[in-house]
Structures are given as structure tokens and as C-alpha cells.
Amino acid sequence: MTKVKQRVFHGVVARYHWHDARWFATVGWAPFVIAFAGMVTSSISYFGWSFNVGSYLGLGSFILTEGMLMLILYFIISMAFFAGGLEWYVLCRHCPCYEFSGKEHGKENRFYCLGNWGSPKLFKYNPGRISRFRQATFLGFTGFFLLFPIVYFVDRWEFVLFQLVMAVSFIVTLRHWACSQCPNFGCILNCVSEDDSKKFLEGLDKGEIYS
């Protein structure tokens, strides 16, 4: 009979499952859905100046807009950070899940957590403190992902409101359901209590959590 490994230690999640990653993806993609809906139907228009690519190409402003092209760039920049390796370097490699989760899934060259399921381990595990520069990098790209689309529909208050509501909801949900139980104590968003994090780290040092 296979022994079920303990998932939570001292209020901290040590092992994530696929349904955790699926939940995170659903919550995380919500702001992008609003951004997509707004940007494909918008183009920057400030001080009487606007730029519609479709009009210049004779396709019509509703067929190809600057917003559509910038949506692609916005997506590429966001994914380059969150799924392209930069986040793994500035944030993930400091987390115990980065080091130990792959072995438990039979793939030591990958890691499995809430936000990254089966991502490759490209960098050396470096537990402990995350520098302020790396914290700022993480916050900067997160802010870019959540708020940049507002530039394209700042004159459409309903989309601005939707984007802000989605951004705030995402951060509040993340802090309440994920950051309050995350083992990456060096992350600036982590809000695990000092007592729980201390007990978790003691158990980690004793080899009581991962084996």
C-alpha cells in the first residue's frame, strides 16, 4: 500500500497537486481575458493622436489595430518572465519546492508548484533571502502584467474598472489562499507567520518534510 505523503506542515504547503496549479491558472488568466477584450478593440488616442495599423494598410481600423499588435507584445513580455525563466531565477529557485518537488514526480530536472507545473530547473537552488532588486523585478513584471493594458483603454472607464477589479482580486486572492501557505519565505508577497515559517524550516533541516 502506497503511503500518502503529508501535504501541509505547520500551516505551510510542502507539496502541491495538479488541481492547485489549475486553480492558480484560472485565477491568474482572468486579468488577461479583460486585457484581451479591451486591447483588441482599442488604440491609443491621446491629445487627438491615434494610430490604427489597419487604416494605414487599407484593412480598416477594426481589422488590425495597434492594440492588437501590442497585445501580442504584452503577452510575450509577460510570458517571457513568468514562463520563460526570469521568474524562476529571481524567485522560484529560492523555494524548497523548486529543489524537492521534481524528485517526487520522478523528474529531478523539473519542479512542480502552484504557479509552475513541470517547469525546467535551469538554475541552482539557492534557499534563503531574496535580494531587494530581485523582489523589485518580480513586483515590476507582476504590475506590468496586471496594469499595462489600462494604457490602451484609459478613456473607456468600464474596462479600466474591470481591469482594476481583476488585478485587485487576483492579488487579494493570491495573498489569502496562496501566499499565506507558501514555503518560499523570501518572496515579498509571502505572509506566512514567523512562527510557522520557523517550524517549517526546522523540519526541513531535520529531513522531516521531504524524503
Image (cartoon, rainbow, N blue to C red):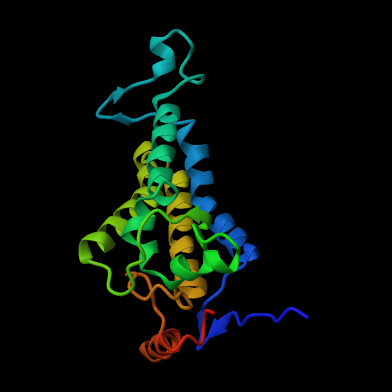
Quarter containing the N terminus: bottom right
Measured from the top left, where is residue 167 in percent x and y? 44, 57
Which quadrant would residue 18 be assigned to in this image? bottom right
135 left or right of 101 in image: left
Query: Up-down: is 66 above or below 152?
Result: above
Residue 107 vs residue 180, the one in the foreground: 107
Which quadrant would residue 135 be assigned to in this image? bottom left
Which residue is depicted at the point 21% across and 65% down? 132
Measured from the top left, where is residue 71 in percent x and y? 43, 34
Measured from the top left, where is residue 84 in percent x and y? 41, 46
Q: Is residue 113 visible?
A: no
Query: Up-down: is 125 above or below 82?
Result: below
Among all residues in the image, which is located at the extreme top? 58
Which quadrant would residue 65 be assigned to in this image? top left
Q: Is residue 191 visible?
A: yes
209 left or right of 138 in image: right
Which residue is depicted at the point 34% across and 21% down? 51
Measured from the top left, where is residue 70 in percent x and y? 39, 31
Count the marks.
Answer: 0
Which residue is depicted at the point 39% across and 78% down? 191
Which residue is depicted at the point 36% across and 57% down? 123
Quarter containing the C terminus: bottom right
